[in-house]
Image: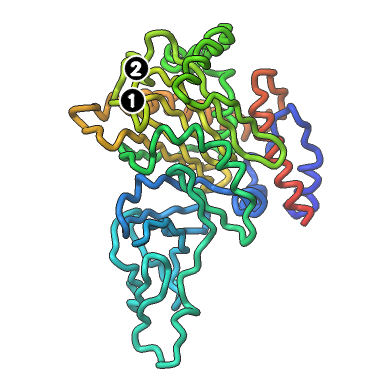
């Protein structure tokens, strides 16, 4: 598919309807999305609890790009390309770990954690080390969440910071603890995974556990009264309740909504699964839901945080990472049971995975054509509109 055909495809998009088939199955469309969406946006990569000590690192991959996310001696977080500036060898070969220095396994060039080239053995005396520091990308953190941008000129990060700061602060992610990280690979286009998590039109029929925990998730209950009552209680506790919507030029969504009466946490029996997290002192903070386009979702209750990160592998495969965070003082086996902590979102995530894969399976057939979104799928429309607009602008450049 050449550029003119892509421009025509984008121009035919009708807001309020699902995308035409090529948007979901074409590798050429995904390549264009990499340039117009993924490389020009702030991408969520992980959290600072994954890097508790200087020298701790993990690898972040997206398509052909691979970066080392590492904590330096001054506690700053850096994002370096996993490529030695000598002849390009990967520096880190493990998914995560701890290093005193970054040492190339090929010719043993040595880099400090901030990217400074410390030693290039057997190079001439006039060799300028400063010219060969590791190549890095833009990186920002907001209350423990880590975002990177692959573009030389990243968009303004302040709208994300402003939208998330007040919601995240009570959780104290910088001082929290990783309880579990689990990774999955779905046979579905990345946009279908994102769309699925922007609506609850499917919840009543697909998520009995979720509907048992959240008021109104089945879309059959009026939640306005309980929402107002809870917002007064939350405001007295200093908890943020201001709705943050994705508007033109922004990418963040934030909301707080109530659990059902007598439900304390996201768990199969509705009971608490750990000690209150961060600054929380009880189990009545509702649910904090955060989204940042294109790849970050978070649901948090009083006693734990669950995050989801999606990354396209190909037009037909999406990698998904779940992460569970608990309070820094929570002890496994005493304050929480790992299986009880993770089971709710493992079950819900598995249900969503099947829905997304079934969706993609049907879209690949000759019988697929764009269908209209329901009124309750307005957030899906918002997301799809955003994607198409990013493509439209990028293709004009």
Could you tell me residue 316's position as x and y percent? 55, 42
Q: Secondary structure at mark 2?
A: loop
* Label placed on residue 204: none
Could you tell me residue 243's position as x and y percent? 60, 26
As drawn, is 168 to the left or to the right of 97?
A: right
User: Quick one: label 1, few (<14), some, or many (20+) residues within 10 Å?
Assistant: some
Q: CA distance from mark 1 to mark 2?
A: 7 Å
Please determine whether, in this image, residue 358 is positioned above or below residue 217: below
Q: What residue is pinned by disc 1?
A: 343
Colour style of the rendered protein structure: rainbow
Q: Look at 40% across and 33% down and name the residue there.
A: 171
**Residue nearest the observer in this picture, 137 or 220:** 137
Please determine whether, in this image, residue 325 is positioned above or below residue 217: below
Q: Quadrant of the C terminus?
A: bottom right
As drawn, is 71 to the left or to the right of 4?
A: left
Res 220 seen here? no
**Residue nearest the observer in this picture, 344 or 112:** 112
User: Quick one: label 2, few (<14), some, or many (20+) residues within 10 Å?
Assistant: many
Splitting the image into 4 quarters, where does residue 92 fall? Answer: bottom left
Marks 1,2: beta carbons within 8 A? yes
**Residue nearest the observer in this picture, 381 or 234:** 234
Q: Look at 45% across and 92% down and name the residue there.
A: 126
Q: Secondary structure at mark 1?
A: helix
Res 111 seen here? yes
Please determine whether, in this image, residue 213 is positioned above or below residue 112: above
Could you tell me residue 46's position as x and y percent? 43, 46
Could you tell me residue 343's position as x and y percent? 33, 25
* Label placed on residue 268: 2
Instruction: Specify which label sits upstream in the sequence, 1 or 2.
Output: 2
């Amino acid at each position: 598919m050449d550029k003119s055909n892509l421009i025509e495809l984008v121009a035919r998009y009708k807001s309020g309807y699902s995308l035409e088939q090529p948007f979901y199955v074409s590798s050429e469309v995904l390549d264009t999305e990499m340039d117009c969406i993924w490389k020009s946006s702030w991408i969520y990569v992980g959290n600072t609890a994954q890097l508790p000590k200087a020298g701790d690192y993990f690898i972040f991959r997206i398509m052909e790009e691979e970066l080392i996310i590492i904590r330096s001696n001054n506690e700053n977080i850096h994002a370096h390309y996993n490529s030695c500036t000598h002849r390009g060898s990967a520096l880190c070969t493990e998914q995560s770990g701890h290093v005193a220095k970054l040492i190339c396994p090929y010719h043993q060039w040595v880099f400090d954690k901030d990217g400074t080239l410390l030693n290039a053995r057997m190079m001439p005396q006039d060799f300028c080390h400063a010219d060969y520091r590791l190549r890095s990308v833009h990186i920002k953190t907001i209350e423990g969440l880590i975002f990177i941008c692959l573009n030389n000129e990243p968009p303004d990060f302040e709208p994300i910071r402003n939208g998330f700061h007040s919601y995240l602060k009570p959780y104290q992610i910088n001082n929290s603890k990783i309880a579990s990280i689990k990774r999955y690979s779905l046979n579905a286009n990345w946009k279908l995974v994102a769309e699925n998590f922007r609506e609850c039109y499917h919840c009543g029929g697909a998520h009995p556990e979720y509907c048992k925990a959240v008021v109104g998730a089945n879309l059959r209950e009026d939640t306005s009264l309980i929402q107002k009552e809870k917002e007064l209680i939350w405001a007295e506790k200093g908890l943020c309740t201001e709705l943050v919507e994705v508007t033109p030029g922004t990418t963040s969504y934030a909301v707080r909504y109530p659990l059902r009466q007598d439900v304390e946490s996201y768990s199969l029996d509705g009971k608490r699964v750990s000690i209150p997290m961060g600054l929380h002192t009880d189990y009545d903070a509702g649910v904090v839901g955060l989204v940042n386009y294109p790849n970050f979702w978070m649901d948090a209750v009083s006693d734990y945080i669950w995050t989801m990160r999606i990354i396209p592998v190909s037009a037909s495969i999406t990698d998904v990472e779940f992460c569970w965070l608990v309070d820094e003082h929570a002890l496994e086996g005493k304050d929480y049971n790992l299986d009880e902590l993770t089971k709710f979102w493992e079950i819900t995530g598995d249900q969503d995975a099947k829905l997304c894969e079934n969706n993609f399976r049907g879209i690949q057939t000759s019988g697929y054509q764009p269908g209209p979104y329901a009124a309750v799928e307005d957030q899906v429309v918002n997301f799809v509109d955003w994607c198409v607009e990013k493509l439209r602008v990028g293709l004009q450049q």
